[in-house]
Amino acid sequence: MDPHFERFGKPSLHNTKSTTIITHDEYLSGNSGVKATYPGKAGDELAFYLVAEDADTHRKWQINLSDRPDYAIPITDYWEWELVGKQIYMFFDVIRDSKLLGRSKGFSFTILDK
């Protein structure tokens, strides 16, 4: 098995009442999102992948500005509108010094359409 595969724990939802659902109101607020937890280092690049049936794969990049244990990105109606009402599979990659450090375990959640 690839030593980079599932090196980090699964992501989780951020600023939601549920651990597996983003309500339509939470989605419209722009405050909900997904969170990566791993031993972060300033300068690491995170690539968050959101995959759903009948939708383009979304990849969101973030560069860590400080050493921290967790990093969150918002789920917004501007970019993720085509994921609403679908089961979403999500994982993240960590790139350090231009090399793949590892990939997280997968996580599934839903954004309610009403």
Image (cartoon, helix red, strand yellow):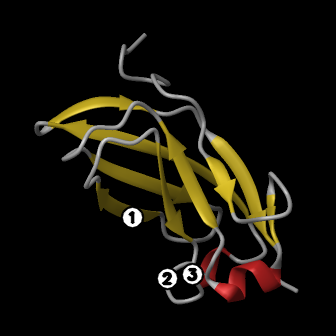
Spatial distance from mark 3 to mark 2, Cα to Cα?
Answer: 6 Å
Residue type pointed to by label 2: Trp
Residue type pointed to by label 3: Thr
Position of 75 relative to 18 (above/below): below
Outermost residue, top direction?
1
Spatial distance from mark 3 to mark 1, Cα to Cα?
Answer: 12 Å
User: Of callouts 1 and 2, which one flags the residue occurring earlier in the amino acid sequence?
Assistant: 1
- Name the residue at 34% across, 49% down: 46
Secondary structure of the residue carrying tag 1 is: strand
Which residue corresponds to mark 3? 76
Which residue corresponds to mark 1? 60
Q: Position of residue 13 (x, y in %)?
A: 68, 55
Position of 97 relative to 25 (above/below): above
- Name the residue at 45% across, 45% down: 92
- Tag 3 and tag 2, C-beta contact below 8 Å: yes
User: Of callouts 3 and 1, which one flags the residue occurring earlier in the amino acid sequence?
Assistant: 1
Q: Quadrant of the N terminus?
A: top left
In this view, the residue in front, 77 or 40, is 40
Which residue corresponds to mark 2? 79
